[in-house]
Image (spheres, rainbow, N blue to C red):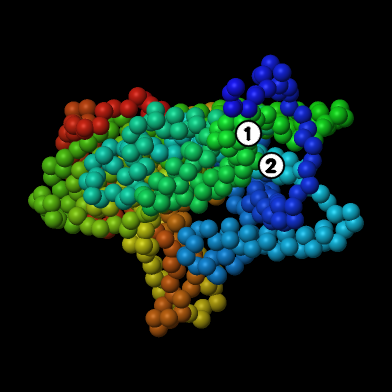
Amino acid sequence: MSSFPLETPTSQVNWVEQPASPKPWSKLTKFLFRVAFVFFVSISLPNDPGWYKDLFTFDWTSLHYRDLYDIARFGSGLNIFGNKIFGSTLNGYATWVITLIFAVVVGGIWTVIAERKKPQPKEYNLLYYWLRVVVRYRAGIGIIGFGYTKLFPTQLPYPSLGVLNTDFGDLTLQKIYWLSIGIVPWYEVFAGVVEVLAGALLFFRATTFWGAVLLFGALADIVFVNFEYDGGVHVYSSYFVLLSAFLLIYDIPKVYNLLIKERLTIPVHYYPTFNKPWQQWSRVLLKTGVIGVFIVWFFYLQGVNFLYDPYKQPALKGISELRGNYNVTEFKVNNQVIPYSPLDSVRWQQVTFEKWTSLTFKVNRPVDLDLSNGGGSPMRDINRTFELTGVAGGQRVFYYEADTVNKVLYLQDKNRGRQNRETREIEGKAARSDRKEKPAEDPWISAETRKIIGSEDEKIHPLARSTRRTRGMVTEAEEPGKESTKFVGWDQSNNGTVKAQAPLRKRMILHYSAINGGNRVILKGIDENKDSIQVVLDRVNRKYALSESTLKAGKYD
């Protein structure tokens, strides 16, 4: 006779999900739940009043992808004295610790009050159900916002020519990792599919387990690589690992019973009944609304952004006849020829006109290293910095506006590091009564020229225009003349000399001539040091080990 226990035939098992019978919880279980309830509610809800203001002030008839992205990605938890108490010791996790301390205190008070009640609560199954709903939707919405920037590969862009021309040793660890994903955009798309699918599965109770498994696995890997490559999103990716781990705790005993103990396991879950019509309709409408906004609508907005306005690289087309790599054949400063030398700190090397409005060149002079991930500001091309972030070795990147009638380029340095923060001295007495007066504007680009150049906002594809971008162009505007004389503050030191300090961009004004279809380009004008320069460029076809990608953001043809 077999020693194995008899199993119930599967044909006789009732697999219909039904409410589980509530079982009394131990005192320890109830205390841990109370702490978890306070903690996970705190880290699942926005902690910034500005988030709620934006939610009701967005122009929902003309959304930018960043509007939904900001709704999906927000700060949470209690950030009270966290950084002051722990400093940089916790490397960004101070908010979690402060929130946990708060949750333990509130959970303890809750326990004392609950234990004094007659009768005492036996369980919190209903409250546990709604806590899981909050965490499910928070994790789902958040990871979909994260995943769409990979599904449409804009988060880790394909490298520009200027980046490809950079020596490998001049790249930071984070930049190397971002580029290693950016050069394989179809893998980036796959990562986006995993993240968006995980979020979508979390919107449904029956598929929560599989969504949490996908989310935990995908984001745990991202946490690891961010620590190893000095990435900047390890805290946010750890956030989703924590949320998914909490959701998995509910099913781990069942999985253990099935896979380890090899016992018959019926997945019975507790859930409340929705018998009233208004409850049923509310549930359907809310779920449909969330799916419609964060899956369907977000998909469309991110697709438009990928095609016409990728947020990490300029959206406007560069001058087509100038695009490409060039050798510097001749370089003059103040009519003096500077011969080629790899050690020269003035002469340009490896000049590139990108397919968008950027001029890149290298000089043998250190630049301030930008350690951000290159997101910059998504509203203006000049503030999109992925071309220069994490790149050392004297790499310079200038954004240009082109007067194509008179063939003049107005260029501004995209790197706003310490060396670009200059001081303008305005003579006067410190005690003068008109301190609030602003100096006269510097007419860097005339009104007539500005009309020829046109507005950046009006030149992008109509589908990519939005209320946020239009408003952002105004609030982020850095008109050349206004910026150089921007009033910041007065300094009464230096024997009465009055100073106004502002972070300036280095600027150049260069006339361009494209000869023989752009095979030779001559630039003449004023450089960033107010010296006259003349640069003769001859096009060169560089061979890269990297093959051309079939999937790139932006339309520049």
**Picture quarter with the N terminus:** top right
Left or right of residue 401, residue 341 in this image:
left
Q: Nearer the viewer, residue 363 or 32?
A: 32
Q: Which residue is mark 2?
A: 132
Element under disc 2? helix
- Residue at (33, 39) in percent of width and height: 180
- Residue at (58, 23) in percent of width and height: 2
Residue 387 versus residue 531 in the image, above or below? above
Residue 313, image x, y percentages: 40, 39
Residue 499, image x, y percentages: 43, 72
Residue 406 versus residue 169 in the image, above or below? above
Gap between marks 2 and 1 measured at Cα: 10 Å
Q: Which residue is mark 1?
A: 208
Q: Nearer the viewer, residue 414 or 182?
A: 182
Dot label at residue 77: none
- Residue at (55, 70) in percent of width and height: 85
